[in-house]
Image (cartoon, rainbow, N blue to C red):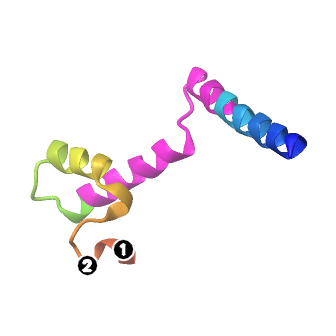
Amino acid sequence: MEPPMGQLSFFLLALQWARSQMENVQVKPFTERLVGGRVEKLIKMYPIYNEGIVADFAEVDVFGSSEDPNWSKGD
């Protein structure tokens, strides 16, 4: 069991290192780009509301779980 656990641990360590290096060179990691796209999409969907409030909501709304039925369709 030791070799597979060691390989998996090294792989996870390498992923963490790669993410920190991306942040060092000012490149957004995938999850931040995903959230940024969700923020822009929600702001376009609801232009009548305050952009700051909609952006804050989109950043904390887990997996686009808002009550709007059109949210998951990608319109």
Question: Which residue appears farthest toward the top when viewing the image?
Answer: 24
Residue 52 visible within the image: yes
Q: Is most of the magenta stretch helix, strand or loop?
A: helix
Which portion, as a residue range, is magenta?
Answer: 18-43
**Residue sitting at 65 percent across and 25 percent down?**
21
Was residue 28 drawn as part of the magenta stretch in this picture?
Answer: yes
Task: Where is residue 47? Give x, y as percent.
Answer: 16, 58
Quick check: 67 left or right of 18? left
Residue 46 picture location, percent across and down: 18, 62
Residue found at x 55% / y 26%: 26
- Residue 19 magenta: yes
Mark identifier at residue 69: 2
Q: Quick one: label 1, few (<14), some, or many (20+) residues within 10 Å?
A: few
The disc label shown at residue 40, or none:
none
Describe the element under mark 1 as helix, strand or loop.
Answer: helix
Q: Residues within 10 Å of mark 2 (few under 14, many from 20)?
A: few
User: Amino acid under label 2?
Assistant: Pro
Identity of the residue drawn at 19% across and 51% down:
54
Give SS at disc 2: loop
Check residue 72 in the rendering and tell me which mark sits there, or answer none. Answer: 1
Which residue appears farthest toward the front when viewing the image? 1
Q: Is 26 left, or right, of 73 in this rendering?
A: right
Residue 75 shows in this picture: no
Taking 45 as reference, is 52 above or below it? above
Q: Is residue 21 left or right of residue 5?
A: left
Quarter of the image where the C terminus is located? bottom left
Tally the marks: 2
Tell whether label 1 touches label 2 (CB within 8 Å).
yes
Residue 20, how many percent across, how many down? 61, 26
| Closest to the observer, 29 or 2 | 2
